[in-house]
Image (spheres, rainbow, N blue to C red):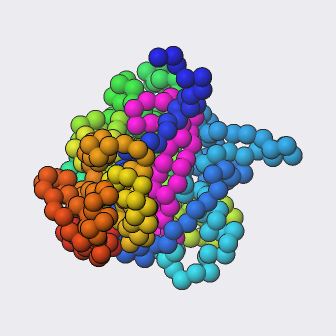
Amino acid sequence: MAAPLYQCPKGTHDILPDEHLYFSFIKKVVRYHCRRAGYRRISTPMFEDINVFVRSIGDTSDIVEKEMFVFESKSGKKYALKPEGTAGVVRAYLQNGMQQLPKPVELYYIEPHFRYNRPQKGRYRQFHQFGAEILGESDPAIDAQVIYLAHKINTDLGIADRLTLQLNTLGSLEDRKKYKEDLVNYYTGKERSLCEDCKRRLHNNPLRLLDCKEEDCQILASMAPKLSSVLSEESKEHFRLLQEYLKELKVPFILNEQLVRGLDYYTHTVFEFWSKKDGAQNAIGGGGRYDGLVELMGGPATPAIGFAAGMERVIEYMKEAGIRPPNKDAVDVFVAQLGLIAKKKALPLLNELREKGINTVGAVGQASIKSQMGLADRIQAKYSLIMGQIEVQEGTIILRDMKKGSQETIPFEGIVDKMVRLLGENKLKNKKLWEE
């Protein structure tokens, strides 16, 4: 077969119907847990003024330096497709006067994002994230609640046992400033052992030296000074309380002093969910506290914390775990008919069943009953309703249970209500809380 004339852009992918089952399932679980915890949904534009990201993420971060899709409008203004969610949420928070709302302000999003990086398994140039942000509260109990929310979502998606929660603190902005000086002093004279990226980071963003994946850089990082040596008593207390709260919530974690995250706006708590098999190479996401970001973007001093997870990466884990989400598009009833009189009865029956919330497919062509039933098998319909000229004349219809292979002839009158009862009982047995 010849290759198609057009293909989707490199680093993007089509989300086909079977894949959408996973996306829909994840969205339902996220919406359920966020709503129950008081979060309200927000959506920001797919592109923003480039300075929204340069100012918030940091002009020395990998995202700003290498990974943003940047374009210029006809008026000459520069925009960027959003590479992450927090900066846009903070911009919306300030622009729309949300700082006047009762604190804390709890928001969540489920959005596409864009990064110009090397495409690989589970990593795309257009990808989807769900995330949550809490603005206006500095108590470490809030940090614990955000982490618990992420952990609970992972649990209900069936992937929590494949992940470890990595936890660290970056301390205050003052702590970080002292620590950066210690790192620069430590690495000075060792530049020859660093990769090209880390040679640049040494002068622009020394914290990123700690999470480089190159072997020589990792060896140096393991012997580098620890941030804990410069933490203020206040920072230590915040982190100590967070750990106590997580233990009360029965959320297991691993302390990881080399965890720094890739964005400049983080302070105090940072966390990531790593693969037990591949470690940081296959993390699904994470987050942290960003107490200075709102002020940096022109607002009042506002403590805040958030997290985000990549949906494509989550789906990859679900598939590895053999998790198949419920198919809300599954066909409940297949209506088979033979002959013009039966077809006339079948058309309104199809619509009545659909209006009752029953997923119904009908064969209205000229195919034989045998081929129609073959189609019902292929699309895995739960039940089939079959009628021909004799059934129409007698006022009956054949109800076939496709799984059991049994069938019975019953009155046509009341068939819609009977199917509602049959399918309603089955759906209630398998219903999850987030499907309410």
Q: In the rendered picture of this protein, how many numbered marks are placed on residues?
A: 0
- Name the dominant secondary structure of the magenta segment: strand
Specify the quadrant that holds the C terminus.
Answer: bottom left
Image coordinates for residue 240, horizontal then vertical, percent: 30, 65
Q: Residue at x 41, y 44 (%)?
A: 366
Question: Left or right of 399: which side holds 87?
Answer: right
Is 12 rendered above or below residue 369?
above
Residues shaded magenta: 107-135
Direction right: furthest residue: 75
Q: Nearer the viewer, residue 260 or 321?
A: 321
Image coordinates for residue 164, horizontal then vertical, percent: 26, 49
Q: Residue at x 24, y 58 (%)?
A: 383
Is 155 rendered above or below residue 100?
above
Q: Residue at x 34, y 54 (%)?
A: 337
Is 124 rendered above or below residue 382?
above
Asked whether residue 333 appears in the rendered view, the answer is yes
Image coordinates for residue 392, horizontal then vertical, percent: 32, 64
Q: Nearer the viewer, residue 291 or 9?
A: 9
In magenta segment, residue 118: yes
